[in-house]
Image (tube, rainbow, N blue to C red):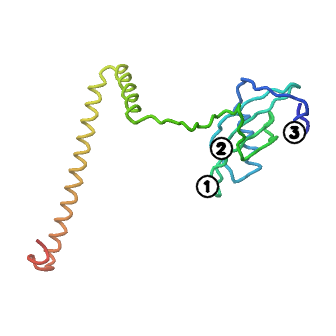
Amino acid sequence: MLWNNQKMPGETYVQTADAVSPAVIQSIANSIQAMYPDVYPVQTIYINPLAGSQGSQIYNARMVFINTRGYFGIQYDIQADKSGKILSISELPVTSVGDVFQPYADEVKYSAFSDTQAVLDQQFAELKTQVPGYQGKLDTWLEQLRSNQFAAADSAARDVNSSYYESVENVRAQGYGNDNVFLS
């Protein structure tokens, strides 16, 4: 049971698999913004509902906010009641054996790009089998893309050349410089 926004001594909590209402998430974020007006919610990492042995319900949550004055991120570990009132809040993440996230081990192995490329190639091959006539559509699209890019490049080059020659003709028409020295 909660009494004056405090957990009752002796009450034990167990995590439940209940869905968390968006209204609860919003009320927790609003409560944090009321405490810290310069923060804006960016990401809800997790919200775990906990049922108390005396019938109360609280939420353990981890949320990321951005400080709009200093433009840096803040991660809060939060305990809130079912109305969204903050029971406890910490800027330092609490890690434990049962924490949601497991840290990287010292022996982290990253996959080589060739392994990643092989997986991507396999996924693309599977997608190609699902779309009949993809090759013709892909070839048509690529050809249209190339011709549009070629036409745009040709047009841009003609515009640059024509404006250059127009400016040269204007200079000549005004009689500036000697053709042998000033313009060639």
Q: CA distance from mark 2 to mark 3?
A: 23 Å
Q: Nearer the viewer, residue 57 or 122?
A: 122
Q: Which amino acid, by three-letter code, is at mark 1?
A: Tyr
Ranked by sequence position, the earlier of labels 2 and 3 is 3
SS at badge 3? loop
Which residue is painted at 22% across and 60% down in the image? 160
SS at badge 1? loop
Residue position marked by numbered label 2 in the rendering: 64
Residue position marked by numbered label 1 in the rendering: 71
Q: Position of residue 157 (x, y in %)?
A: 21, 55
Q: Which amino acid, by three-letter code, is at mark 2?
A: Val
Residue position marked by numbered label 3 in the rendering: 5
Q: Which amino acid, by three-letter code, is at mark 3?
A: Asn
Residue 22 lies, with reference to residue 179, above or below; the image says: above
The reply to whether callout 1 and callout 3 are in contact (CB within 8 Å) is no
Disc number for residue 144: none
Q: CA distance from mark 1 to mark 3?
A: 32 Å
Which residue is painted at 25% across and 42% down in the image? 148
The reply to whether callout 2 and callout 3 are in contact (CB within 8 Å) is no
Q: Nearer the viewer, residue 164 or 39?
A: 39
Rate crowding at label 2 as few (under 14), some (14 to 19) or many (20 or more) other CA atoms within 10 Å.
Answer: some
